[in-house]
Image (spheres, rainbow, N blue to C red):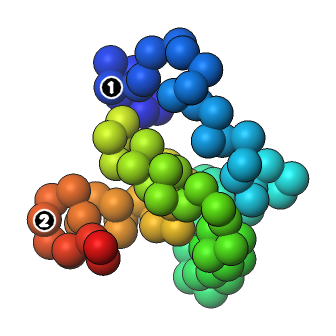
Amino acid sequence: MAEISRLPGPLAERWDWQIEGACRTVSPETFFHPEGERGPRRRAREAAAKAICGSCPVVTQCLQHALSVREPYGIWGGLSELERELLLDGSVRQAS
């Protein structure tokens, strides 16, 4: 679970970007791995999720949200858990 103290308040303006998400009509299972998923199956699922993110009009807001609340699971803003962790740790520079 994300650190809830970092979540934005209940104002609709802070969450409205989600209405435009390309993921809204896709099964959440595309973005969140089942327990024990590894190898080619996981890579294929992540690639499918990232492809959806690649055409999303709110991918930037999604990634900003995931980084600010440190979403621990799933593909958010086109990045996996590990990719976000590396970005937050400063191991990877975010493209501007």
Task: Give the mark, 2 or 1, whose residue is nearer the N terminus.
Answer: 1
Nearer the observer, 86 or 38 = 86
> Which quarter of the picture shows residue 6?
top left
Image height check: is 38 above or below 32? below
Q: To which residue does mark 2 refer?
A: 90
- In the rendered view of the protein, which quadrant contains the C terminus? bottom left
Specify the amino acid type for callout 1: Arg
Quarter of the image for residue 86 reads bottom left
In percent of width and height, residue 87 lies at: 24, 64
- Residue 50's x, y, as percent? 61, 74
| Residue 12 position in % (x across, y down) | 61, 20
As helix, strand or loop, the secondary structure at mark 1 comes to helix
Q: Is residue 26 above or below residue 20?
A: below
Closest to the observer: 32 or 66? 66
Residue 35 vs residue 49, the one in the foreground:
49
Instruction: Estimate the spatial distance between the alpha carbons at disc 2 and disc 1, rounded to whole Å.
Output: 19 Å
Residue depicted at x 72% and y 49%: 20
The quadrant holding residue 95 is bottom left
| Residue shown at 20% from the left, 74% from the top | 93
Residue extending farthest to the top is: 10
Residue picked out by circle 1: 6
Amino acid found under the numbered disc labelled 2 = Gly
Q: Is residue 65 left or right of residue 89?
A: right
Q: Is residue 29 left or right of residue 85?
A: right
46 relative to 2, above or below: below
Q: Which mark is residue 46?
A: none
Count of labels in the image: 2
Residue 54, visible in the rendered structure: yes
Seen from this angle, which residue lies furthest left?
90
